[in-house]
Amino acid sequence: MTEPLPPAPATLSWGGLEYSAARKAHIRAEFFSQVNAAMVTGKASGDPKLIRLPLTAVWALLFVDAEKADYDLSSFEDDVQATCGRGCAKGMAWPDVERFLRETLGS
């Protein structure tokens, strides 16, 4: 659908795999920014909450560089499949992201 976002700006600093309300709000805003861009360009349509972003894009949103060094894309994909099943094989909608944060990362 869309290209992954670059890492969060250096001014945004998060603790290792800690998902505060501010961090979750940032992730949500960036997620829907990508969804909206896909809708504007005609690459996606429908309910924004149900539009799926590619797993690479979601991984880029959820983790900062230091976390990615310890939790690579392949590990993320495995955990997504364990949490969401085949429905998330190619991408995640916002409810999938919320479920992953809650069930896999305990946030």
Image: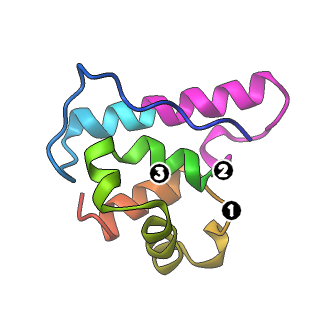
In the image, which is nearer the foreground, mark 1 or mark 2?
1
Mark 2, secondary structure of its residue: loop
**In the image, what residue occupies the spot 51% across and 36% down?**
31
Give the amino acid type for the residue marked by disc 1 in the picture.
Lys
The earlier-in-sequence mark between 2 and 3 is: 2
Specify the quadrant that holds the C terminus. bottom left
Q: Residue furthest right?
A: 42
Dot label at residue 59:
3
Q: Where residue 42 sits: x, y (%)?
A: 85, 29
Q: Residues within 10 Å of mark 1 (few under 14, many from 20)?
A: few
- Which residue matches tag 1? 90
The reply to whether callout 1 and callout 2 are in contact (CB within 8 Å) is yes
Give the amino acid type for the residue marked by disc 2 in the picture.
Arg
> Is 103 colored magenta in this rendering?
no
Q: Nearer the viewer, residue 73 or 12?
A: 73
Tell me, yes or no, if residue 107 can be seen here. yes
Chain part drawn in magenta: 29-52
State which quadrant residue 69 falls in.
bottom left
Q: Is residue 37 above or below residue 62?
A: above
Q: Residues within 10 Å of mark 2 (few under 14, many from 20)?
A: many
Dot label at residue 3:
none
In the image, which is nearer the foreground, mark 2 or mark 3?
3
Tell me, yes or no, if residue 64 can be seen here. no
Residue 85 horizontal side relative to residue 106, left or right: right
Magenta segment's dominant SS is helix
Q: Is residue 83 above or below residue 53?
A: below
Give the amino acid type for the residue marked by disc 3 in the picture.
Trp
Dot label at residue 52:
2
Specify the quadrant that holds the N terminus. top right
Q: Nearer the viewer, residue 92 or 9?
A: 9
